[in-house]
Image (cartoon, rainbow, N blue to C red):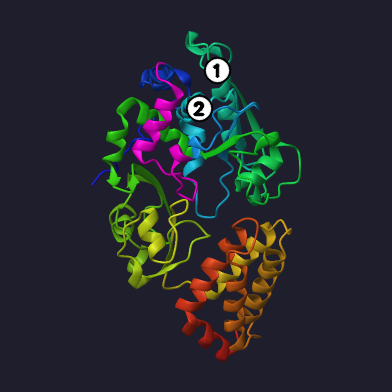
Amino acid sequence: MPEQRVIRNYVDRPDSYTVESYLASGGYSALRKALGMTPGEITDAVKKSGLRGRGGAGFPAGIKWSFIPPDSKKPVYLCCNADESEPGSFKDREILEKDPHQMIEGIIIACYAIRSHKAYIYIRGEMPYGARRIQQAIEEAYEHGYLGKNILLSGFDLDMKLYIGAGAYICGEETGLLESIEGKKGEPRPKPPFPAQVGLFGCPTIVNNVETLACVPHIINNGADWFASIGTPRNTGTKIFGLSGHINNPGLYELPLGINLLELIEEYGGGIPGGRKIKAVSPGGSSSAVFSADELDIAMDFDTVAAAGSMLGTAGVTVMDETVSMIKVAQNLAHFYRDESCGQCVQCREGTWWLEKILREIDEGKGSIEYLDIMLDACSQMRGTTICALADGCAMPIESIVRKFRDEFEEHIKRGHS
């Protein structure tokens, strides 16, 4: 069964990143249509479509837009979160490098809907190729009248700026991103107030993911009902799944939300190399609780995965075969989150450090059985107790690994060596 491509429809063209190629495939027609609608009609269409944020949380995009005060006396900003840093996630990079105008068109329409006249694209510092493509696309959009003053003679003005981050994972969190754009240390802010009320430079701000914004032109062109007909009733549209790890055909696959995880791995990913068995799967990037081999017959949508104790997240699916040491997996995760913690919350700063230390000692044959319950206790104290979700992102996968593969930990501890 082929992919159901919407966003990835033209990425295989060698010149897909140029404005000429985008226009040839019908690009910016959604913008022309949107400028003939009222901002409220656009927001209502996105609400009706059921589009949920593709950056991890899955919050309804149209509802998020409606949080902007309609009578704001302050400027309104839109920030596109292109700080894709989640291990296992690489979907946004393709859009940035191969079809940037699709995202830019979505940004312009979203700005018109929320009455914003200034947009920022915040891109990860380790994506210089994508940054060059985005900057070129912004310049082309200005040259063709899609950005700047009086866009397409509509009376709507919009300026757009690319902001290149310095590589901190924490800046993928929306308020950490805003702090970085303001020239401050990239640290998340306490919420409330939420960015829609007090965001960039203290003004109402919407932060949307690259893939989320890339969906918007298709909703405007094809209608909310069309988008809502794809996927499941509460999880509409297609989703770009990133398959990596021990898989024969790693890569990106755009499929309706609700596809079965086993089908995704076997039919699209081509199964496991060498006929080996699956041991574990991370379904939504490194921050998601892992599934064991007997938990893979599950629909890949936000609600079903959450009900199973994990999260769809970025839909970065990492497959681990039977040769993998889950102790080393947990240790690598703890090291990453300890290294990327901004340090302002004690539970995160200390919790990630202690988890890494304990896992390293277990791996080196210096651990004891008591360490396992100490880790579980640390994870429970980290979850839901910090300003942002980084601590949860560390605790969730490690707790799931310890619980589901406890026998492996106990056997390793009893052997007393790596």
In the image, what residue type sits under mark 2? Ile
Residue reaching furthest left? 1
Question: Residue 58: x, y in percent?
Answer: 45, 49
Quick check: can you spot residue 193?
A: yes
Mark 2 Cα shell of 10 Å, populated few (<14), some (14-19), many (≥20) = many
Mark 1 Cα shell of 10 Å, populated few (<14), some (14-19), many (≥20) = many
Vertically, is 235 above or below 150? Answer: below
In the image, what residue type sits under mark 1? Leu
Answer with the quarter of the image where residue 136 lies: top right
* Quadrant of the rendering where the C terminus is positioned: bottom right
Foreground residue among 338 and 54 = 54
Asked if the stretch drawn in magenta spans residue 81, the answer is no
Answer with the quarter of the image where residue 123 lies: top right
Foreground residue among 330 and 117 = 117
Going 45% across and 24% down the picture, which residue do you hit? 39
Marked residue nearer the N-terminal end (2 or 1): 2
- Magenta-colored span: 36-63
Question: Residue 114: x, y in percent?
Answer: 52, 28
Going 59% across and 72% down the picture, which residue do you hit? 379
Residue that mark 2 sits on: 104
Foreground residue among 195 and 360 = 195
Vertically, is 376 above or below 247? Answer: below
Left or right position of 407 against 157? left
Name the mark on residue 147. 1
Going 44% across and 37% down the picture, which residue do you hit? 62
Vertically, is 147 above or below 122? Answer: above
Quick check: can you spot residue 11?
A: no
Foreground residue among 405 and 399 = 399
Q: Are marks 2 and 1 in contact (CB under 8 Å)?
A: yes
Left or right position of 184 against 23? right
Q: Give the total of numbered labels.
A: 2
Asked if the stretch drawn in magenta spans residue 48, the answer is yes
